[in-house]
Image (cartoon, rainbow, N blue to C red):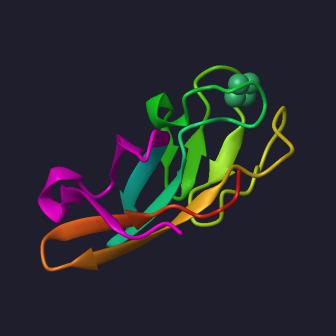
Amino acid sequence: MSEFVRVASVSEIPDPGKAMFEVDERLVVVVHVDGQFHCIDDVCTHDGGPLGDGELCGHELACPRHGAKFDVRTGKALTMPATEPTARHEVKVEGDDVLVKLSSES
Ligand code: FES
């Protein structure tokens, strides 16, 4: 079972901003927006694009390959060509530490 893993300090991810991390050999992107942190897989469900390299606009993160947008709060695909959600992971802040817990979603 996965546990929370420290990935960064709060100050290392600007608001708004994002950063990519590898947690247990899984690539994830942590997004900081409106004072909240969110975490989703760094993988677009259309064709594997690196979401962490995409443009962040509010809570929407656009895939740099073909432009599908995902809601960073839920992982839901908002626009074509992606139709399936990407995995969402739990994030919490303890003191100055940002911690991520991988979900069991694939
Ligand atoms: S790989 Fe992301 S939209 Fe195509």
| Residue drawn 53% across the image and 39% down it | 42
Front residue (pair 104, 41) = 104
Dividing the picture into quadrants, the one containing residue 103 is bottom right
Quadrant of picture, ligand 1: top right
Total residue callouts: 0
Front residue (pair 74, 8) = 8
Dividing the picture into quadrants, the one containing residue 31 is bottom left
| Residue drawn 84% across the image and 32% down it | 81
Above or below, comparing residue 27 to residue 34 in the picture = above
Residue 44 coordinates in the image, percent (x, y):
67, 35
Residue 50 coordinates in the image, percent (x, y):
55, 28
Question: Which residue in the rendered view is the most extreme toward the front?
Answer: 1
| Residue drawn 47% across the image and 45% down it | 28
Above or below, comparing residue 3 to residue 45 in the picture = below
Above or below, comparing residue 9 to residue 66 in the picture = below
Q: In this view, does 33 lie to the left or right of 50?
A: left
Above or below, comparing residue 49 to residue 84 in the picture = above
Q: Is residue 13 magenta?
A: yes
Q: Is residue 2 left or right of residue 20?
A: right
Residue 10 coordinates in the image, percent (x, y):
18, 63
| Residue drawn 37% across the image and 70% down it | 4
Where does the magenta region start and end? 1-27
Question: Which residue in the rendered view is the most extreme toward the top?
Answer: 65
Residue 62 coordinates in the image, percent (x, y):
60, 37
Q: Is residue 61 left or right of residue 30?
A: right
Q: Does the magenta stretch include residue 79?
A: no
